[in-house]
Every structure is written in structure tokens, then in C-alpha cells.
Amino acid sequence: MPAGTGFARQKTDPVWVCTHRSGISRPGMKKESTMTKRVLMIALGITVANAVTASAATPEELEATIGKLEQRIEQQDKRIAELEAAPDRLKDQQSHREAIREVLKGMNEDAQKRSEMPGWLENLKFYGDLRLRYQGDFSDWGSTSDSERKDRNRARFRLRVGAEKTWLEDQLEVGFRIATGESSDPTSTNQSMTGNFSKKDVWLDLAYARYAPKAVKGFSITGGKMKNPWLMNEIFMDSDINPEGFWAEYKAPPIGPVEPFVGAGHFVLMERAGTSSPAHDTIMYGYQAGLAWKAAKDVKYTFATYYQDYDHFDDSGALARGNDSPLTRVPDFGVIGLTNKLDFKAGKLPMSVFFDWARNCREADSTSKYEDDKNAYFAGIKIGENKKKGDWSAKYIYAILGANSLPGTFTDADFGFANRRGHVLRGEYNILDNLTAGVTLFLTEPIFSPTTTSGSSAFEDKTTTVQVDLVWKF
């Protein structure tokens, strides 16, 4: 062989082996090599020997070939080392995962302990709403020369916050709600923005307990200051009215598509025995019966009849607000009423039509133009609903409230109490699921022009009221 080739013939080995820079020798010379490496070296040696015998390669070509073989062997060495170390790495990774699991388990247990609430907080729900309103009241007083009756533009707000808690698998419920308001007027929770940044009053709006035993399914009894249990429209009884007393009702099991219900109550308007000027207590006894008939998949008809017996109403101290002169109060009211509502869908659009009637069956004022005005009527239609973002609704109402038909002090304040007739238009749109924008327009006038404008009602002539609202629910 030429000098400097770096190859030597071993007498005992039938193949050429490399003793060049690579440091590779015959298999078996390095005890620490694996069987895989030995097989690879033998294969490479055979390849080189075949290449040498097949052609007379130059030293430079051999040098290049050997360099490539060295690189390949180094790569194989690294791969072999990685494979040999893989089990250890997997074991380390598994140990690391177990450690992470233990840490997360501890964090979860700690979070659960922190989130545990006292037992009295279970089944407790808070709720509320905030309403911002612009209200404009514009009047045409005709020949009335009362300088105090001027158009008004007001910024107003209403805040209500309440809570409900249940026990005994929802058999017992206790709730309360507080609300803003400029006075103790039962027909309003609005607060006007005025008073040189003064603090505003908050009133107790609801405080009640309800028991609905499972042993008598459908029966419940409620006591305290409660939500209005009557199926009356918002004109006959203002939506802010929350009566005080006791109410029991029973919803009977369905008879086919019909669900009957009955109710009765005892409500206290004024307790006078302990006052400086004792008089009769004013009590309202109420009764109601009706049914809900699901006539078809998207068709439901609700009917109710009720009777409200106001005992010694003239001793209540309540403002007449449209009743009689209008300062003189009707001695007693015995109001019988009918409520009718039909809910259905026009395609996918929810719709409702309604008609209510009420009449005072008791003694009326002797003033000639008021004494026979004992009937009240309410009719309208609603299209759409407001449940989620993008929902809208529109509503139209026409109502007539005779001067002696209903206690004026409890009828809708924005409509103008009793002795009024007119139109109500309302539109609402859900900007978000819990944010609604709305516009309401009241166009009303008195049925009979009163002989005086002092003290009894803020609406004694043609009045236009505009309300623009933003309502957040939480």
C-alpha cells in the first residue's frame, strides 16, 4: 500500500479496518461498544474495502469518504445515546407530572375550603335593577289659571336591590327589597335628580315570607309586604303597588289543558285605633278565581275574576286622586273585575291581546256628574318580547278610568290616576341580555273637568308624558 494511506493489512482479519483519525478498530477492541455499533462498524469496513478493491481511488477521495463516514458514525452515536437515555428521561417526566398533580390537588382542596360558605348563605339569591329616565310632562290647561301647573323636564333614576332565600327544599321562602323614592307614595320608586347633590332616600319595598308545603301541592300562603298577587293590569293598579297583609292561593292540578286557580287575602291599608284621632281601621278583603287554558302549542288564554272589598276607605287618609270632587273620598269601594289575556304567536313572533273591565259596586259620591261614573275599561295589544339581546316589543293601550270606578290613589300614577282616559304607547329594545332601552308615551285627559285643581292630582287637564328609559338588570 502507498505510504500515508492510513490502512494496514491485518494477518488474522479477512477485512480491512480503519486505523486512521477516526479511531475505529476491529470489533471487540472496545469492550464498551454496543452490539449495534459493532455491526455498523463491520458494515462500514466492508463497504470501504469493496470501494478500494473496486477502483483505484485517490487519497483525497478516500479522505472525503472517511470524513463522511465519521460524521455518520457520530450521528449514530448521538442517536444511540439518546435512545439509551430515553427510559431515564421518561421516568423523570413521569415524576415531574406526579409532582404537578400533587400541587394542583393541594391548590384545588385549598380553593374548595376557601369557597365553602356558611350554611345560611345556601339557596340565597340577590337581584336588582337600575333605571335611568328622562321624563317630560306637558299640559294644556285650557281655561285653568293655575300658575303652578307648568311643563316639567326631569332626570330621574330608580334603584331596586333585593334578596330571596329558600329552606326545606323550597317550601319556605323569605325575601326583601329596598328601593329609591322621593316619598312613601306607593305608586312610585322614582327619584328625581335635584336637591343640590343631597343624599337620597331608600325605602323598604318588599318584606315577606311564603310557605308552600309539598304535602298540599299547588297551595301557598304569603304574609308581609308582598308583590301584587292580583291579575290586574298596570293601569287599574300601579305596577309599583306592593300590598301589605296575607294572601293564600291554590293552583289545582291541570284538568286536561286547563289549570284552575283561586286566591283570597286580607290587606291592611290603615290602622287607626292607636292614633291621636282614632277611627275605623281600613281593610281590604280580596278574592280571585280563574283559569289558564293552553288551547294549542303556542296559544294560551288566561281569565280571572276578582272582588276587592275596601272597608272604611274614607278613613284611610289616602288621597282621592281623581275620585269625586276630586277632594272628597268615596266612603267605600267594592270593586268587581274581569281580566282576559290571549297569548299566541304569529309565525315566530309572540303576541298578546287583552281586555279588562272593573266596576265599583258600592256607594258612590253624590256629586251628580261623578256618581254614575263607576266603570273602568282597559284594552290593548303587545307584539314581541324582551328576554335576550336583540329582542324588541311594542305595546298599545287604551284605558278609561271612571271617577268612582277604582281607588284613584292606587291607579297608575303616570296615566294620571282616576277620572282619566287616554292612550299609552310603549316600545322596548334589548341592547344586551340585561340592558333594555325603552320609550313610553302617555296621551291622557280628564273625563270630567274638576271644579278645583288644588291638592288632589297632578293631572287635571290634557297631558302628554314622555319617558325615555335605560334599564340594567342584575
Image (spheres, rainbow, N blue to C red):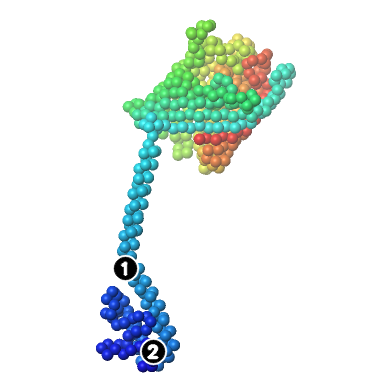
Kindly state the secondary structure of the residue where label 1 is placed.
helix
Q: Mark 2 points at which residue?
A: 5
Quadrant holding the N terminus: bottom left
Kindly state the secondary structure of the residue where label 2 is placed.
loop
Q: Which of marks 2 and 1 is in front?
A: 2
Does residue 3 appear in the picture of this structure?
A: yes
Residue at point 29% right, 77% down?
30
Q: Is residue 312 left or right of residue 212?
A: right
Badge 2 local density, few (<14 within 10 Å), some, or many (20+)?
some
Residue with the most extreme front position: 3
Quarter of the figure with residue 108: top left
Q: Name the residue under label 1.
A: 84
Instruction: Choose the circle earlier in sequence order: 2 or 1.
Output: 2
The amino acid marked with disc number 1 is Glu
The amino acid marked with disc number 2 is Thr
- Could you say where residue 121 lies in the image, as x and y percent from the top left? 40, 31
Q: In this view, does 111 lie to the left or right of 436?
A: left
Q: Quick one: 369 or 392, which is closer to the camera? A: 392
Q: Is residue 440 left or right of residue 334?
A: right
Residue at point 35% right, 47% down?
105
Residue at point 58% right, 15% down?
319
- Distance of label 2 from label 1 (alpha carbons): 35 Å
